[in-house]
Amino acid sequence: MRILSNTIYILLTGYTLIFFSEWMFWAGRPPVDGIVGEVILTLLLYSFVGILFLAAVDYFHVRSFWAVFLAGALYGFMIEGIIVPTMYADFPLNLSWTPLAWHAILTILFGWYYLPNALRQSPKAGILASLGFGVFTGLWSLGWWSETLLAPPGTMVIYYCAFSLLFFIALVLRGRFPRPDFSQPGRGIYIAIGLMVLYFVVVTLPQQPFALVILPPLLVILLLTLRKNRQTELLNPSPSRSMVLTARQALPVLLIPVMASLIYVLFYNANPPALPVLPIPAVATPVYALFYNMTLPTLPLAYLVLTPAGFILFGISIYRIWKPKPV
């Protein structure tokens, strides 16, 4: 029963990770690129990486904002530096985009760490966080219009709502299962690490030989800093152990698809392509008329903001953990 309980918890955590790292990242593109059809495979992959992430959180006593970011950086480097080695292109900018800029900041700091705690501690903070991310997702989705075929608004409404509803369910159910304890890594963790190293050697390096001189030094810096955190961080409860949410507390996350859908439909109808549009009440016509033929470069804007933010937070986090603590 313990193995079954741990497995369910890890799968629910894995879905939380892919909700931000995959479903919301690709929102706006027509879901015909294998994204929806590979939900199970993607869930298993992110759950596997999630095991190593949770193990790092426990073993290195990750408690503070800065340590959470570095654990998120480890998660991002595993995804973008090993599984899909995209961070070696456009060097050195892709060292931040997307491992730090998206995975560490949005998936881990916001989606895994801040949002569940905000929902649990303050309804107002949870509502504002959900509304804000819904607006961000809707605007982000618009940016794909310059790179790919448009997804019809009806399709996107279903897309936002379906994946967000599953996220809501995952948040609520996760609190019903005890959090696995990885503070003393067992044989399974070492096997998982070995598999990740094997994949890096057998799959990643043949595709990106440049990775050999980039990823190992980054991991050494990261792991030494997290080890320093383990030596100095007080053994307060892990942040993930306080993320038990009731359905009522988690309800604001359903504002994410509402806001994203409103923004997507608004701009779609204001910039109608050669596809049918959703009917909008006449009273809303003056609103979306303001945006007629307006396109927003949301992808490059997010890139310009989040990429330097990833580098800056990485540097500050390392400095803050190595900075001598007052006696």
Image (cartoon, rainbow, N blue to C red):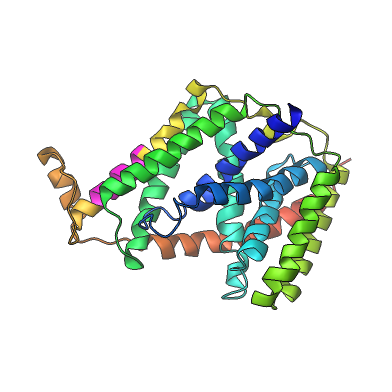
Q: Which quadrant is the N terminus positioned in?
A: top right
Residue nearer the viewer, 216 or 286: 216
User: On screen, 120 above or below 108?
Assistant: above
Please name the residue shown 42% across and 60% down the image.
Answer: 33
Q: Which quadrant is the C terminus positioned in?
A: top right
Q: Main secondary structure of the magenta part?
A: helix
Query: Is residue 266 a member of the stretch shown in magenta?
Result: yes
Please name the residue shown 19% across and 46% down the image.
Answer: 278
Residue nearer the viewer, 17 or 324: 17
Q: Is residue 246 left or right of residue 145?
A: right
Determine if residue 325 is in view: no
> Residue 324's spot in the image, x, y percent?
85, 50
User: On screen, 314 above or below 287?
Assistant: below
Q: How many marks?
A: 0
User: On screen, 250 above or below 58?
Assistant: above
Query: Is residue 240 a member of the stretch shown in magenta?
Result: no
Determine if residue 292 is in view: yes
> Residue 233's spot in the image, x, y percent?
82, 41
Q: Is residue 326 left or right of residue 246?
A: right
Quarter residue 246 falls in: top right
Furthest residue toward left: 282
Please name the residue shown 61% across and 60% down the image.
Answer: 99
Start and end of the magenta stretch?
Answer: 258-267
> Residue 219's spot in the image, x, y percent?
77, 62
> Residue 100's spot in the image, x, y percent?
61, 58
Residue nearer the viewer, 151 or 129: 151
